[in-house]
Image (cartoon, rainbow, N blue to C red):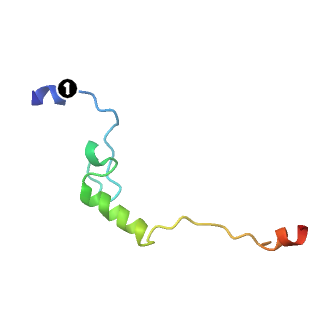
């Protein structure tokens, strides 16, 4: 039965893990393991990853209109 599972075409192509570069696994896609998935989650939760935002120069422009 294990040989039948290997014949199934994967839904997604294997890609390198964004943390360590090893091939990704289906159970923890796009990571290779739960460990790498948790490392990435920890970086988001601690603020290591930040989405850059642009500050508007005219912060008070809405107050002037009204």
Residue 25 in sight here: no
Residue 32 in sight here: yes
| Figure quadrant of residue 8 | top left
Question: Does residue 6 lie above or below 54 as drawn?
Answer: above
Give the mark count: 1
In the rendered image, residue 63, in percent from the top left (x then y), is placed at 85, 72
Residue marked by disc 1: 7
Q: Quadrant of the C terminus?
A: bottom right
Q: Quadrant of the N terminus?
A: top left
Left/right placement of residue 53 relative to residue 50 reads right
In the rendered image, residue 31, in percent from the top left (x then y), is placed at 31, 52
Q: Nearer the viewer, residue 44 or 64?
A: 64
Name which residue lies at 30% across and 54% down. 21
| Figure quadrant of residue 53 | bottom right
Q: Nearer the viewer, residue 52 or 63?
A: 63
Name which residue lies at 39% across and 68% down. 43
């Amino acid at each position: 039965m294990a040989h039948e599972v290997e014949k199934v075409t994967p839904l997604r192509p294997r890609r390198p893990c964004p943390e360590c570069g090893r091939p990704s696994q289906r159970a923890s896609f796009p990571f290779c393991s739960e460990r790498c998935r948790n490392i990435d989650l920890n970086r988001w939760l601690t603020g290591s990853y930040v989405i850059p935002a642009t500050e508007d120069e005219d912060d008070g422009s809405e107050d002037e209109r009204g």
